[in-house]
Image: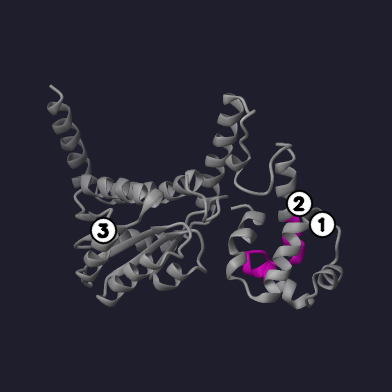
Amino acid sequence: MSVLNEITWLLPSLAENQQKIAKYILENPEAVLSMSSSQFAEDAGVSQSAIVKFSQKIGMKGFPALKIAISEELGRNNLFKSYPHKALHNAISSEDSLMVVAQKLAHEKNAAIVETTKRINFAIFQQVVDAIDNAQRVQIVGIWGSGLTAKDLSYKLQKIGILSLVEADLHVQIATAQALTAKDVQIVISFSGRRKDMHIAASMAKAQGATVVAITGSKDNPLAKIADYVLESVSDENEWRSSSISSRTAQNTLTDLIFLALMQRRKEIAKPLVLNASMTINNLDD
């Protein structure tokens, strides 16, 4: 996720002083580049130590690193004169040709894949794969755009012999979570990580002893705090967007990698299962 989008995304959850810093950066990104930390602190009405802590909160070593990240993002945005610092396909206008729309879409989806991959902690990821591989059942929870990702992952897991449970109905999702055990894994997919129904489902599963994995946009959101493991899906898309194009791309990057890792691990049984499923489906068309 680009630094300006990450700041925008985190803004509602920040403390008062951190919000002052965030708002100042979002309103004056170019001006910040030429400021010292003392100048910035004075203009934003905060202490210099608050600026350092803010920089670290969004993954930077300090204020100089934050300025470099802002500068790089503004440089990228200058390639697309009309782009504001928000999701690229938000900038698509009715005057854009289909070719321009395609270029903007490709840029956004590629960025989601690359940035999500950069954020993966592979030690944690391997532990998630271990848990799924050894699970008796895997419940996958998600709604709307995340629900599509949940269904896709469920289908892939079933193809390689892993019993997965996925439901569109929220009440059924919560009821299923309540029936999980310590032998099960629950995967909750939510970009914002702030939906109460997702929190309830995750809390229910955890109370039953199940391992809870969150695929979400930040390690700092409420869902991430419930989960045993967090996989970050990085996308220049805010939580109020309804189309979820880039966030779904980021989620699919992680779920596809989970599937491929399990395919490698289960190669002796997974490959025949996948081939048999394909042959059976092909025979239905004859």
Q: The disc labelled 2 sits on which kind of residue?
A: Ser
Q: Is mark 3 on a helix, strand or loop?
A: helix
Q: Is the magenta stretch mostly helix, strand or loop?
A: helix
Q: Position of residue 221 (x, y in %)?
A: 50, 68
**58 falls in the magenta region:** yes
| N-terminal-most mark, 3 or 1 | 1
Which label sits in the foreground, 3 or 1?
Answer: 1
Q: Do tag 2 and tag 1 residues touch (Cβ < 8 Å)?
A: yes
Badge 1 crowding class, 10 Å Cα cut-off, few under 14, some 14 to 19, many 20 or more, is some
Q: Nearer the viewer, residue 90 or 189?
A: 90
Query: Can residue 239 be seen by looking at this rendering?
Result: yes
Q: Report, in whole angstroms, how far the alpha carbon at label 3 lies from the one at label 1.
A: 48 Å
Relative to 104, residue 213 above or below: below
Q: Start and end of the magenta stretch? A: 54-68
Residue beneath the point at 54% across and 52% down? 118
Task: Identify residue for label 2.
Answer: 71
| N-terminal-most mark, 2 or 1 | 1
Q: The disc labelled 1 sits on which kind of residue?
A: Leu
**Quarter of the image containing the C terminus?**
top left
Task: Identify residue for label 3.
Answer: 133
Q: Nearer the viewer, residue 113 or 275?
A: 113
| N-terminal-most mark, 2 or 3 | 2
Residue beneath the point at 72% across and 58% down? 26
Q: Which of 246 and 110 is in front in this view?
A: 246
Q: Position of residue 228 (x, y in %)?
A: 38, 71
Q: Do tag 2 and tag 3 residues touch (Cβ < 8 Å)?
A: no
Task: Identify residue for label 1.
Answer: 33
Relative to 31, residue 18 above or below: below
Q: Position of residue 50 (x, y in %)?
A: 73, 76
